[in-house]
Image: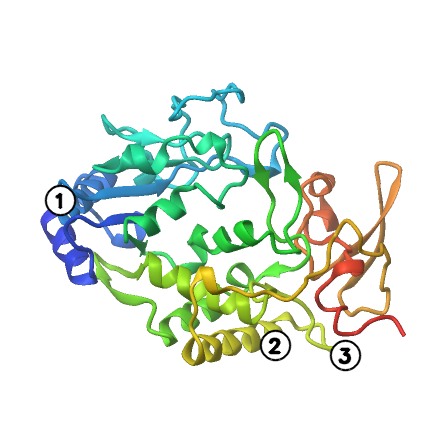
Amino acid sequence: MIDKKSLAYDLTALGIKKGDCVMLHSSLSALGFVEGGADTVVDAFMHAIGPEGTLVTPAFTRGAWFSRLAMDDCSMDCVGETCPSQSRSNEGAIPNAVLKRQGRIRGCHPTHSWVAYGKHAKYICKDTYKCQTLCGKGTAFEKVVELDGCIVTLGVMVNTVTFWHYLEDVLELPYLGYYHPAERHLSYCTDGRRIQYEFPGVMQEVVRAVGLLKEGRVGKSKSGIMRAREFRRFMATIVNDDPYCFIVRPPDRTCDNLAVDAMNKGAAMIRAYETNPIDIDEIDLPILPNKKTAQETVREDCPAFAGWHEAGGKSYSLCRANDRHPELFRNGGIFNKCGKTTCGYCPWHLKFPVE
């Protein structure tokens, strides 16, 4: 039987300290049978961090793939410090248990709100309606770093960590996808496939190899903890070394195996962090291509080219190495598997320009 006392002990052994601000990504089922379910897990965290600590979990709802980019009870014009929505989260039982707590605070975002419980809950969540993107400046990510908090993967891998998007938003990296201004919603990575989603094991091994991830048992799960400031430093280092490090594409003209690029990028991340770690204020990126001025072209010689396909009376060129496009995936079939071609500013073709 797994109870609050044993869970709290495991969390402390993992590295959670009194007063910590914990950004939690979780799977209740991975813990085994917990007496009292998700509420017991929340109680265990609050016991581990104490009255000076704060628990933060994603309260995300349906996201960019639905017709209305908002929670069911969201008015879309709310400008309150915090969000009054009672909509359930799609992130599992533990976030929904936090949402039911008296005194919890929810940040105001139509699709990607966060819920916080504890001493700094209001500070973390207030005024997020002012943030222009999901994960950039002013969001919960910056607040957790400011509070010297930690990121906990409870029974899940690091591919679930939303913090990966933080520097992408802040730096406006050129491969970012479709932006919905009214909903402040950014669909990530239509110019490639995200390495942590396609090859989660690669990223798990990378953060473990550089000493960023400390792992241990919580209940029956294999869980992990990363300090938020160290994680931001790691991300700053690898983005500065390669602005396209988070996405994978065919590594050469004759290879369509994305795993080769994923493993090469993982090795480069390790080398960069072990050689010259930097922080966010030290980033010095090269001049990157601008989507607005990039030449629109289709490279049918690319191994990732997926052909021309008809939908809604139009013909679209698709790419196997690009993530699905939110406006096209509703057509089903190949549109739910491939993204639109972006050859004019594709990072792979930047290495192999048209002769």
Q: Which colour scheme is used?
A: rainbow
**Closer mark to the observer between disc 1 and disc 2:** 1
Residue appearing at x 46%, y 60% in the figure: 281
Q: Which residue is drawn at 79% across and 60% down?
A: 343
Cα distance between the residues tagged 1 and 2: 45 Å
Q: In which quarter of the image is the C terminus?
A: bottom right
Q: Residue 50 carries which label?
A: 1
Marks 2 and 3: in contact by CB < 8 Å? no
Q: How far apart are marks 3 and 2 (CA)?
A: 12 Å
Q: Is residue 243 above or below residue 19?
A: below
Tag in front: 3 or 1: 1
The x, y position of residue 34, in whole percent, is: 20, 46
103 sits left or right of 182 in the view: left
Q: Can residue 27 be seen in this view?
A: no
Residue 314: image x %, image y %? 88, 41
Residue occupied by mark 2: 260
Q: Is residue 189 left or right of residue 128?
A: right
Mark yes or no: residue 175 visible.
yes
The reply to whether callout 1 and callout 2 are in contact (CB within 8 Å) is no
Decide which of tag 3 and tag 1 comes sooner along the chain.
1
Q: Is residue 48 above or below residue 209?
A: above
Give the image quarter of residue 46.
top left
Question: What is the crowding at mark 3: few (fewer than 14 residues within 10 Å), some, or many (at least 20)?
Answer: few
- Say what amino acid the circle numbered 1 marks: Gly
Residue bearing mark 3: 254
